[in-house]
Amino acid sequence: MFIKFTLADKLLFAAALLSLIFSEALYFQGEKIDAVFMGLWVPSILAFGIYLKLIKNSKND
């Protein structure tokens, strides 16, 4: 499954996953506002990865 992913794809996925884990850790430590802020980064990071993939594909066409 991960064979088609480039290094940049894997790094962005890891960043999103780490952001999610860090957000959950903050939430359970009682820092709810900070956890929500960190949690909002997850879809932003994934959307940026999709944007980069679309730019790469449009240059190849």
Image (tube, grey):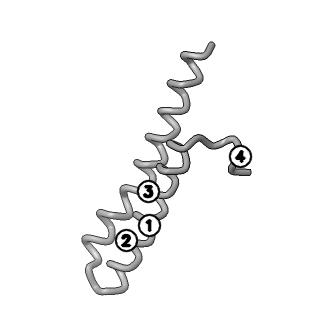
Badge number at residue 58: none
Dot in front, 2 or 4: 4
Find disc 2 in the rendering and name its residue: 23
Around disc 3, counting alpha carbons within 10 Å, would you say few (fewer than 14), some (14 to 19), or many (20 or more)? some
Q: Position of residue 10 (x, y in %)?
A: 55, 50
Label 1 with label 3: CB-CB less than 8 Å: no
- In three-dimensional space, the C-alpha distance between marks 1 and 3, rounded to whole angstroms, equals 9 Å
Find disc 3 in the rendering and name its residue: 15
Dot in front, 1 or 3: 3
Dot in front, 4 or 3: 4
- In three-dimensional space, the C-alpha distance between marks 2 and 3, rounded to whole angstroms, equals 12 Å
Q: Of the residues shown, which amino acid type is indicated by label 1?
A: Leu
Residue depicted at 68% across the width and 50% down the height: 2
Q: Position of residue 22 (x, y in %)?
A: 38, 72
Badge number at residue 20: 1
Mark 2 or mark 3: whose residue is earlier in sequence: 3
